[in-house]
Image (cartoon, rainbow, N blue to C red):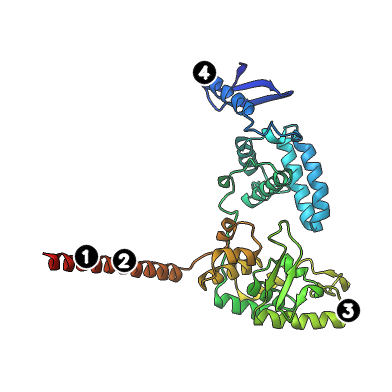
Amino acid sequence: MAVYRRGKIWWYVFEFDGRRIRESSGFMNKTAAQRVEAKRKADLLDGRAGFLRKVAPPKFEDAVESFKTWSKNHHRPKTHELHKLNCDTLLRYFRGKWVDLITPEMVEDFRQGRLRETRRNAKDGSTVSPATVNRALSTLRLIYHRLELKTPTRKGMFSKEEGQTRVVSVDEETAYLLTASQPLRDIAMVILHTGMRPEEVFRIEVRNVDLRRKTVFNPWGKTKAAKRIVPLDEEALGILGGRVELAQRAKSRYVFWSPQGPGRPENKERTIGSVRKAHDAAIGRAGIEDFRLYDLRHTFATRAAQAGVDVLTLAALLGHTTVQMTSRYVHPTDAHKADAAKKLENYNAQLVAEMIERQQKVSTISATVN
């Protein structure tokens, strides 16, 4: 066994399957470090670390290059650029490492290190935000998903800011829609009534809207679940029906095509890329704070759950692969939780009443026999 000390912590280094493995034991005691090393070797020999694969996983930089090529062909330009930026950050920490030897502890070191780094071009010395770190972790997970390897991230690595959601109240919804300009208002209404992601609504094509069947087909997405047929209620059907008519008249491929504006010539063959400026202006006029367009999707999910839609159906509507992901978008109100507690109370009371009834019947039978 080869263990050595760096500062107060003991590390181990050995060769396995032609690779040099050097990792921290996490202990200040030499004997404990030797035990960690022995267990690590045993894990590798048992194949639990992935060494029994017919094709050895690549080094991290090679995996990144492959991922970036795939991303360029499957993601929109802005999304692809974000992944490229995240890859550059990840490479600073994981370059030279074999992907199957990157451990959750290494990823945790990356997370903590990034949170301590100063933001680029930050004159006030502010550090990198948790949201920025979360985006890099999401890219890391997608890289591993592409390789069909278990991701070395754990749920606890994502800060509380990751996955934070907001449900829009009816008053906020009304104020927002009254101040929103077009086509933002129609886009917001479609999200609110279908649960579709904003980018999915932006990319709706005329040919994918079926007014007779009251559905819209979304062919885009990272997973099979995201590529789905979405049912339309009367509100969404009316909006998309009007938009389809306008698009056909304008001979546009898209329901929401790139509008004409300052420095932005109208392009009927290109979809809308963003409504951020219109959204920011609308929430400013409505006096609403901390409200993203994506929150309308959360609102749809929460209202659907409160209306009694089961989680499996809701997951299908939202285009989620797992119900665990769907649960992040469902936010019962206090009234909804109180109603659930009341239902449970009534159910328990019914059980007690049935038990008393059975006991009385048994007593009656016993008295008759005696």
The part of the image, by quadrant, that contains residue 171 is: bottom right
Residue 283 visible, this angle: no
Q: CA distance from mark 3 to mark 2?
A: 64 Å
Q: CA distance from mark 1 to mark 4?
A: 64 Å
> Which of the marked residues, 1 or 4, is nearer the chain's N terminus?
4
Observer-nearest residue: 45 or 150?
45
Q: Which residue is mark 3?
A: 251
- Dot 4 crowding, Cα within 10 Å, few <14, some 14–19, many 20+: few
Q: Which residue is mark 4?
A: 31
Q: Which residue is mark 2?
A: 351
**Residue 5, position as x, y percentages in the image:** 59, 19
- Check the image and report above or below for 290 versus 93: below
Give the residue displayed 59% in from the left and 48% down from the top: 158
Do labels 3 and 2 touch, CB within 8 Å?
no
Q: Which residue is mark 1?
A: 359
- Check the image and report above or below for 335 versus 243: above
Left or right: 354 as drawn, with respect to 325: left
